[in-house]
Image (cartoon, rainbow, N blue to C red):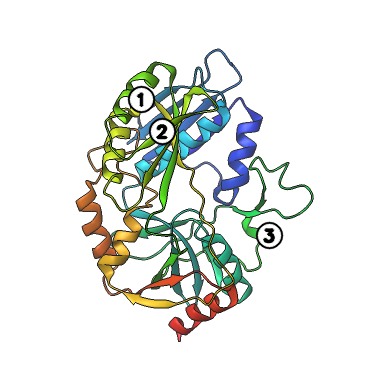
Amino acid sequence: MLLDSDSQEFLELFDRDYGWFKTPSTNSKKRLSISARLNDLKDPFVRITKTNNFQFSIFNFQSLRGHPSPVSCALQRIIRTIFAEIEDFMVLHAGVVERNGRAVILAGPPGAGKTTLVLELLKDGYGFFSDDFCPIHKVTRRVYPFPRSVWVVDDGSNKGNESGRKGKTCLRPDQLPSGVSDQPCIPKCLVCLDPGRNADSFCELEIGVKREGAKGLGIDLQEIKNLQFSMVNGQSSGWRIRYPVGQGLTPKIRELLARHEQHIWNVYRADRIHPDFEKDPVLTPIATHEAAFCLLRDLKQEPGFSQNGDAHRYAPGELFMELNRLLQGVPCYRLSAGSLDRMAGAIARIEN
């Protein structure tokens, strides 16, 4: 991928998260060239050009006119497009550490404690793969490193004021307690982190909406029962929706968002989970299909949110079957939240 922009702020933000992947330009038969023009506030845009066998074509052009934060939106759009183009890997929403050539995959919803546990395990001598991305090769079923920078809660006096993410500080891979492991390896186990959410908990999403699509989205949201929604800060450009977990509403939400995709800037999880790290954790073996179901809820390659409509997009049922195949023979567990040293100890016992 080649990236250029007229915005130094954008380039610095991208480099801060993905600087580990920077490499000199190389010729390739297939690559993406991305141009982000963001300093013209009247008409900022992202243009993505695909090169296939040295044939150039404009693959994706996205005007960011009217967005309150074009730099942030451009970053999200580019990362989403990159993941939508990945064909050889299934990318799980999971942290990964490595020891003795075997990968320990730590899956869980946002806020479940993946980053916290990854950092704890790095102190015990594990190598770092990622705290949030787990690419598994579809043929070899090996896990590959994805050393994006890590964001941690900042308890200091600055509270992450210079980080760009409220209350968090960025740690680049070379600042972590252990080194980055750079060789793909087979998975030792998959651990689904259970933060202890109640059965009556809710999922919350925040949706950035283009002005011309706000009315239609609002009308369709009213058709879904047990769904609560409201404008963010009274602005029609932002919607917050809230619905109960476990009532089968997630597929309906995905279908609705896919239907309105051309009028949506971005979608992200807004609910917050607060694991109890004071109690005793419990490690329980689970079946492969149960682990696959947990993973399906938080994949990095969401079938409903990709931008290009490629034919290789999975249907939900196909995704589930593919996850089961990739996890075949991998021991799977559920680990409830608890004290970090005991959670790390439970994972060490799996290895032994």
Q: CA distance from mark 2 to mark 3?
A: 41 Å
x 34%, y 60%: residue: 294
x 22%, y 46%: residue: 315
Q: Which residue is label 1 attached to? A: 218
Along the viewing direction, whichever of 225 and 84 lies nearer the viewer: 225
Please report contact status of discs 2 and 1: CB closer than 8 Å, yes or no: yes
**Could you tell whether 280 is left or right of 60 in the image?**
right
Percent position of residue 188, x then y: 40, 75
Q: Amino acid at mark 3?
A: Gln
Are there few (<14), some (14-19), or many (20+) residues within 10 Å of tag 1?
A: some
Percent position of residue 18, x then y: 56, 47
SS of the residue at dot 1?
A: helix
Q: In the rendered view, would you say 25 is above or below 134? A: above
Q: Which residue is label 3 attached to? A: 175
Q: Amino acid at mark 1?
A: Gly
Identify the disc placed on residue 229.
Answer: 2
Q: Quadrant of the C terminus?
A: bottom left
Percent position of residue 174, x then y: 65, 59
Q: Amino acid at mark 2?
A: Phe
